[in-house]
Amino acid sequence: MLQLCLKMKNYLSLILVLPWLWACNENHFITDKSYRDAVERDFQKKQEIMSEGDLFSVLRLPISVAEKEALMFLYAYMPIGDVTDYTG
């Protein structure tokens, strides 16, 4: 009986910890870290060039890590005319 109780305690602990671990997991749109860093640098350059207005406000919304990275990629490599023509 004691052995069964200890097993149940271990399973309960695992069930309680798994959602926390899952929430900490960031699903990246760009899985390669060095490429992700390059995209972020290119995006920051585009932001500096286009500092007038609020063209990148969509990135302040509550979005996932993957969505943010995808938008940063699009903005980093999108022609300047397209950035100004379309809202976030």
Image (tube, helix red, strand yellow):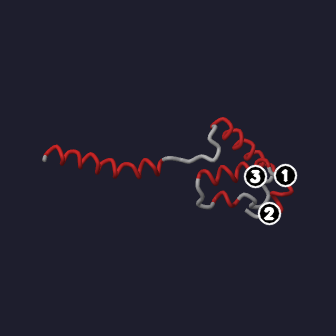
Contact (Cβ within 8 Å) of mark 1 with mark 3: no
Label 1 and label 3: CA atoms lie apart by 8 Å
Q: Position of residue 39 (x, y in %)?
A: 71, 42
Q: Residue sitting at 34 percent across and 51 percent down? A: 15
Considering depth in this image, is 23 or 48 the residue closer to the camera? 23
75 horizontally vs 21: left or right: right
Camera-nearest residue between 61 and 74: 74
Distance CA(mark 2)–CA(mark 3): 11 Å
User: For mark 1, what is the residue?
Assistant: 79
Q: 22 above or below 37?
A: below
Q: Amino acid at mark 1?
A: Pro
Please, which residue is most extreme toward the bottom here?
A: 87
Q: Which residue is rendered at x = 58% and y = 55% of the image?
A: 64
Sequence order check, earlier mark of 2 and 3: 3
Measured as percent of width and height from the top left, residue 30 is found at 65, 44
Q: Residue 42's quadrant in the figure?
A: top right
Q: Residue at x 62, y 41 (%)?
A: 31
SS assignment at label 2: loop
Q: Distance between the Cα atoms at labels 2 and 1? A: 11 Å
Category of crowding for the residue at label 1, using alpha-carbon neighbours closer than 10 angstroms: few (below 14), some (14–19), many (at least 20): few
Q: Is residue 84 left or right of residue 60?
A: right
Q: Quadrant of the image for the C terminus?
A: bottom right
**Residue that carries the numbered disc 2 in the rendered image:** 86
Image coordinates of residue 80 in percent, x first then y, are: 84, 53
Circle number at residue 75 = 3
